Image (cartoon, helix red, strand yellow):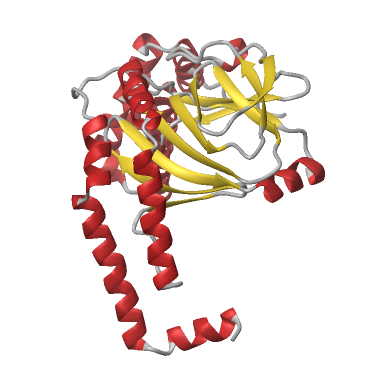
Amino acid sequence: MIVGDDLRAWLSDGAAQRRTRKEIDTFAAQWRGGTVRRSLAAQMALPPHASAEQVRDAACRLFAEPSWVDRLIGNLAAALRHDPFFEPPFQDIHGDIHRGLVLLEDDLVSIAMGVTNIASLAARKIGKSARASVAFSGHVEVFKFVKAGGARLSFWTAPLIGEDFMAAEAGRCRRAGERRIEDGEILVLDGRCESFVVEHATSNLLLLQATAKPDRAPVSVEYDSESHEYVGCSAADDSASRIQMLTTLLRKLGHDAAVPAMAEFLDHPNFFVRWHVMRELLGLDVVAAMPHLKRMAARDRHPETRRAARAVLDQIEAPRVAPRKVA
């Protein structure tokens, strides 16, 4: 029987689908109350205002103990052997090269387990039509190479991404070395100024990754891997992107009543969010946005945001010259 026949039979069997759903729910309940999940939570128990360094150190202690990973993988494998349509009850991470599961997430840390597919990685390196980039995540991160796959990594550094980041001052990245990674090795990176690239591997990589949320940079930054020049940046966290998307939607809908709520985001810690919101406010209601624009031009803590606001304000306030009449 081929896989397609198995799937067709399962889709037409309501009782089988309910059994699968029950097994997923049972696994989720056992995970929430089980020893592995409790061990993760206990190891990562930190004060509410923990620093990135405290999160990093806790993740290193957690990753140094391998038994919980073996138990989790064993439990998942047993569930899949029993029911091939079982889906792990974790948030899924799905990219071109990486597939994974988020095992634990709170206000301080995200811990994920995933596989880097070596065939996809090789295809990208061989078939890429554009030059590759080196990405600096903006987060302090801890990686454990449970299975390193014979990987050889190149290591990179760049100017620190701070709250006052400006593209004009992003500088260039620099290659800092290259070496082979061994099974079980733990790697700590400050993604605000450090990065790595998988240059070569002989098999898939199985990774644990802890991402610290405190003290993160406002943006992640990319550099060209050949010229080492700055390429671009993007929001380092999902919430900033959601705010940008939401305020754009409100402006497109012409929802004037949203102006006060949108204006609250002008105090957002990320400078690019503040400027994006200001642009959408101007597009929605120039009169209502003017007091906020003047305040931003005078007092915003980021120089590029102040300059942009001043330039727009000057344009709005510039005296209009009446067109000359042609005799």
Q: Is residue 155 left or right of residue 210?
A: right
Q: Quadrant of residue 222?
A: top right
As rendered, which of 197 and 313 lies closer to the eye?
197
Q: Residue at x 54, y 47 (%)?
A: 115
Q: Position of residue 308 (x, y in %)?
A: 50, 18
Is residue 178 shown left or right of residue 238? right
Going 47% across and 88% down the picture, which residue do you hit? 9
The image quarter containing residue 56 is top left
Which one is nearer the viewer's eye here, 70 or 145? 70
Camera-side residue: 38 or 160? 38
In the picture, the quarter occupied by the N terminus is bottom right
One can see residue 268 in this view: yes
Q: Position of residue 189 (x, y in %)?
A: 50, 21
Q: Quadrant of the C terminus?
A: top right
- Rendered residue at 39%/28% (across/down): 64
Q: How many marks?
A: 0
- 259 to the left or right of 228: left
**Residue 268 placed where, x, y %?**
32, 25
When the figure is inspected, residue 86 is found, relative to residue 270, above or below; the finding is below
Q: Position of residue 16 (x, y in %)?
A: 35, 83
Using the rendered image of the protein, determine whether residue 257 is visible from the camera's viewpoint.
no
On the image, which quarter does residue 197 sit in?
top right
